[in-house]
Image (tube, rainbow, N blue to C red):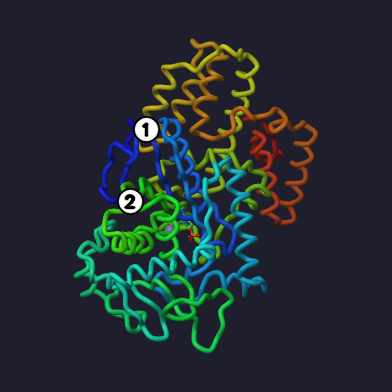
Amino acid sequence: MLRLYNTMTQSVDEFRPIDDNKVGLYTCGLTVYNYAHIGNLRMYVFEDILKRVLRFCGYQIRHVMNITDVGHLTSDADTGEDKMEKGAAREGKTAWEIAEFYQQAFVADLDRLNIIPPDVWCKATDHIPEQIALVRKLEEKGFTYVIDGDGVYFDTSRLSDYGKLVRLDAEGLKAGARVDVVAGKRNVTDFALWKFSPQGSKRQMEWPSPWGVGFPGWHTECSAMAVKYLGERLDIHCGGVDHKSVHHTNEIAQTESAYGHKWVNWWMHGEWLVLPKEGGEAAKMSKSSGEFLTLDYLIKRGYDPRAFRYYCLNAHYRQQLAFSWEALDAAGIGYNRLKRTVLDLRGQHRKADGPITKHMDRFRAAVEDDLNMPRALAAMWAATKDEQAPPGRRYATLVDMDRVLGLGVEKMEEEQLAISPEEIAKLIDERAAARKAKDFARADQIRSQLGAKGIVLEDSRGGTTWRRA
Ligand code: AMP
Ligand code: ZN
């Protein structure tokens, strides 16, 4: 029995789809004005695990992911620059070029992490008529008002349950609100459905609408596209925890107002990847803070993208994951140990060898318990070490578990591990030279590169020695 945490009920509940064994899944995609950072990617690994667990449990999934390529402003309060135009200015390209480039980079990142692509990719700019139709519907029902020179807004005071996802207290919010950042907003929680292009200037991305030339508000796209591809009632909607109080809260308000009934059964949110700060609170990795790491950078430092995936699986999706190079190195070593084990066991596998029920049961119990991947990994390691069981059957067990883990067990190859002692010695010399020249970034990169091949370095006064992990 699959049990999943639902942000709406705040409890772990037995999962039941609306329609027999079919599951509709909508996941908020990337805002493509820059590369995805590894915090974003942690989120997409979580959603991939969810999808794989649903499949493992026998469900058929229809998965839709959007690409935000317009309308996401630098402030969640409907003010600030459009992130796309900001990205375009930074790189001296058009917003359209930026969107195309970073979307492709994002798709490539997902592929390298062995993330199963969605059935439908949809871009905000390809769905302007659908978004206008949604705003029209809300207007007809009396949920909107226009602020001259600014945009069309949703009047949240029309709803008695606005903010139910995060148990927002609308009265408390009203009393506590000091500044209303958008002049003319009736309530602090009101949000833009459609924004007008600034008077006297032309935006790169703008469209005519019944209210004036402009562009959709950020939340409008997800409601319009989710309903278009998955219908008026949805099984699961996911995103990061930062989406709960504004983005998803507003998606709920506008969709349920437009259609007059409950929209989503399960809301699931992934916790952040954070950067620990010495003597302070850990900070969310974010694009705007400037301090963000990309998958490309990890690869340049010698890490296998699958080792990053393995690293993500070591924490439950509802727990923050504190990033450190040491932790990533440890994950890299664990991943290599798995590879070595897989290769050893595979050599003794025969066609008739099936998975071991005892271990599969333990694994299933873990993944069905709100995707408890740390426990699932423990079950996986226990299976590898089960000396009572024939090696071929242990291999078959790993292959079966990999339907969820997605670590690429069947594709693991010897050469990915191989490195000769001569090559190691050369890299150790190069690292010593880099340290002497105080090029610590290069020195760290070499250490990681060797770590990724399962080689651990030990520094002492006498020099550096190495061993296989
Ligand atoms: P964005 O491109 O800002 O729309 O973000 C894409 C997705 O990544 C959203 O679901 C965010 O909630 C999620 N996200 C952003 N930063 C982090 C982080 N540091 N850790 C985990 N998820 C994140
Ligand atoms: Zn969204």
Q: How far apart are marks 1 and 2 (CA)?
A: 21 Å
Residue drawn at (47%, 36%) of the image: 52
| Quadrant of the rendered image holding ligand 2 | bottom left
Task: Looking at the picture, tell me which residue is in the foreground, 358 or 153.
Answer: 153
Residue drawn at (41%, 64%) of the image: 219
In the picture, the disc for residue 264 is 2
The residue under label 2 is which amino acid type?
Answer: Val
The percent coordinates of residue 320 (x first, y second) are 41, 49
The percent coordinates of residue 455 (x first, y second) are 66, 34
Task: Looking at the picture, tell me which residue is in the foreground, 379 or 451.
Answer: 379
Query: Which secondary structure, mark 2?
Result: strand
In the picture, the disc for residue 428 is none
Ligand 2 within 8 angstroms of badge 2 C-beta: no
177 versus 48 height, above or below? below
The residue under label 1 is which amino acid type?
Answer: Glu
Q: Which part of the image, by quadrant, shows the N terminus?
A: top left
N-terminal label among 1 and 2: 2
Provide the residue designation for mark 1: 368
**Is disc 2 surrounded by few (<14), some (14 to 19) or many (20+) residues within 10 Å?**
some
- Does residue 279 appear in this view? no
- Does residue 172 appear in this view? yes
The percent coordinates of residue 111 (x first, y second) are 61, 44
The percent coordinates of residue 138 (x first, y second) are 33, 69
Q: Quadrant of residue 58?
A: top left
228 versus 468 height, above or below? below
